[in-house]
Image: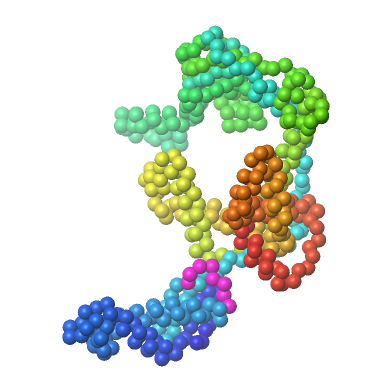
């Protein structure tokens, strides 16, 4: 066989393969025998009609079509190794010609590639989180709330109560849409009656942002949903309905999209409860702290505050480190060069749509239902999800290449150690927990989690300029690491 490989712009390859005429002739004879066993030809038993009779009866085109399909499959399998291409997925027959030599042309999607460039030169400023006293106080308040005595009350609403409400909240300052503003007076008058009901529904949808029959609030200054909300409910009884308006302070940092907005609340009281908080002292600290070793003194309130601060600092650091690593990874992706076939994008979009379908089914719907309601076709959904799919592909390729380039591996000992660490939280059930990870799938999933955690830690260290120097590795070792762990990222 004579094979020519041509790399195409869309990260596919065209394989042009010339075969001997005798190969095609043999394939035609085999195809004729196969077809002869499937058709009835007058005067002959099935499978016994001579080749020339079949040609006259069926036409040479039918035999050639069958022969090209069968021979094409055989040729395609044989040429992949010789052509030195790494296919991402199945190729397709682009063309076949007989003259001057039987020639197949296949188009093959190639495995995606990524060039990270000088990714180790990327630097981003890292700002360590700071935990202030208010954060500690807020965590203590949450502990007090958790340990509080809650009793249903028949008295009217008072400050400090916990109330269950049916509540509807709507904006009172929604502006007319541009389309409505552009309507001429004549058009408005002509369509006034036709659109009256539609406009009401449209405005209602735009205005209402809360409509819930089971909302629970603690009526304290730092918990109420809007300034003045508690005052508006003082004295209300169970079953009573109150309507009132509140204008939020123009403070975007605290109230975000509600800052400066005028809102109407329609509230019905469903339940009133009194909340009696425990006394904040050493006894409380001992009660809410984890069990201590035998003979160890229980923590004091001061120690509890110190423990809370340490816990908050650890949580804040983990969150800050994760966000920082994501930012560095984004920078790496920005300066990297990616190449992938369109088939990969299509596969990723289908993956996202399967997740969407799964989420919808938990709500009693299907993807088909969603397409009908949204008036979208499958092609529309592919267009909607294309950007997300491409972003996922780039991220996955970058992480996989970073794992390889940074020589990150997870040993069996590390996996076992992580299982032991998690199992200690289950006490007497630790042995049962460990048994879950005896199977290959669960253990592999944990290994992948550890692998991802380590690569993100390495990415953060790269951004800070603290990454360790890489040790040169042999090509064989790199190939083994890639096969064993690269794909799992």
Pinpoint residue 401: horizontal percent, then vertical percent.
66, 62
Q: In the shown orientation, is residue 476 left or right of residue 261?
A: right
Pinpoint residue 106: horizontal percent, then vertical percent.
47, 76
The residue at 38%/88% (across/down) is 26
The residue at 71%/69% (across/down) is 477
In reply to whether residue 290 is colored magenta, the answer given is no
The residue at 39%/87% (across/down) is 24
Q: Which region of the structure is painted magenta?
A: 84-91
Q: Is residue 421 in sight in this rendering?
A: yes
Q: Is residue 488 above or below residue 306?
A: below
Quadrant containing the C terminus is: bottom right
Q: In which image quadrant can residue 316 be found?
A: top right
Q: Is residue 85 above or below residue 51?
A: above
- In this view, the residue in front, 367 or 266, is 367
In reply to whether residue 88 is colored magenta, the answer given is yes
Q: In the shown orientation, is residue 279 left or right of residue 63?
A: right
Pinpoint residue 486: horizontal percent, then vertical percent.
64, 62
């Amino acid at each position: 066989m004579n094979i020519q490989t041509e790399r195409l712009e869309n990260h596919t390859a065209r394989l042009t393969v010339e075969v001997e005429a005798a190969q095609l002739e043999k394939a035609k004879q085999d195809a004729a025998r196969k077809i002869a066993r499937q058709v009835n030809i007058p005067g002959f038993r099935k499978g016994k009609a001579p080749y020339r009779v079949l040609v006259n009866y069926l036409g040479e085109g039918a035999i050639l079509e069958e022969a090209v399909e069968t021979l094409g499959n055989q040729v395609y399998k044989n040429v992949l190794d010789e052509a030195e291409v790494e296919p991402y997925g199945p190729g397709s027959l682009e063309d076949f010609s007989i003259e001057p030599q039987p020639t197949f042309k296949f188009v093959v999607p190639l495995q995606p590639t990524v060039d990270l460039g000088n990714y180790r030169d990327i630097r981003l400023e890292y700002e360590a989180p700071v935990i202030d006293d208010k954060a500690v106080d807020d965590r203590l308040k949450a502990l007090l709330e958790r340990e509080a005595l809650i009793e249903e009350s028949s008295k009217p609403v008072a400050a400090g109560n916990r109330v269950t409400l049916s509540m509807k909240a709507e904006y009172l300052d929604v502006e007319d849409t541009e389309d409505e503003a552009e309507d001429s007076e004549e058009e408005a008058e002509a369509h006034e009656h036709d659109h009256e009901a539609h406009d009401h529904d449209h405005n209602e949808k735009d205005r209402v942002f809360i409509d819930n029959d089971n909302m629970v609030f603690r009526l304290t200054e730092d918990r109420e949903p809007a300034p003045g909300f508690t005052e508006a409910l003082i004295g209300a009884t169970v079953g009573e309905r109150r309507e009132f308006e509140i204008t939020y302070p123009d403070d975007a940092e605290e109230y975000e999209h509600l800052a400066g907005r005028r809102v109407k609340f329609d509230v019905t009281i469903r339940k009133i409860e009194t909340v009696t908080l425990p006394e904040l002292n050493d006894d409380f600290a001992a009660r809410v702290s984890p069990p201590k070793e035998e003979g160890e003194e229980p923590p004091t309130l001061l120690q509890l505050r110190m423990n809370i601060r340490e816990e908050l600092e650890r949580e804040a650091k983990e969150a800050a480190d994760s966000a920082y690593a994501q930012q560095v990874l984004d920078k790496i992706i920005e300066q990297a060069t990616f190449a992938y076939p369109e088939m990969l994008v299509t596969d990723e979009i289908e993956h996202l749509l399967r997740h969407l379908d799964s989420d919808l089914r938990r709500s009693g719907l299907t993807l088909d239902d969603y397409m009908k309601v949204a008036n979208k076709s499958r092609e529309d959904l592919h267009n909607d999800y294309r950007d997300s799919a491409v972003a996922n592909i780039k991220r996955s390729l970058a992480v996989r290449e970073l794992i390889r380039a940074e020589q990150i591996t997870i040993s069996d000992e590390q996996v076992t150690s992580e299982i032991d660490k998690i199992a200690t939280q289950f006490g007497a059930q630790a042995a049962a927990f460990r048994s879950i990870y005896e199977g290959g799938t669960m253990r592999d999933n944990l290994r992948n989690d550890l692998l991802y955690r380590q690569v993100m830690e390495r990415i953060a260290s790269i951004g800070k300029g603290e990454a360790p120097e890489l040790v040169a590795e042999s090509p064989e070792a790199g190939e083994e690491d890639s096969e064993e762990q690269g794909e799992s990222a």
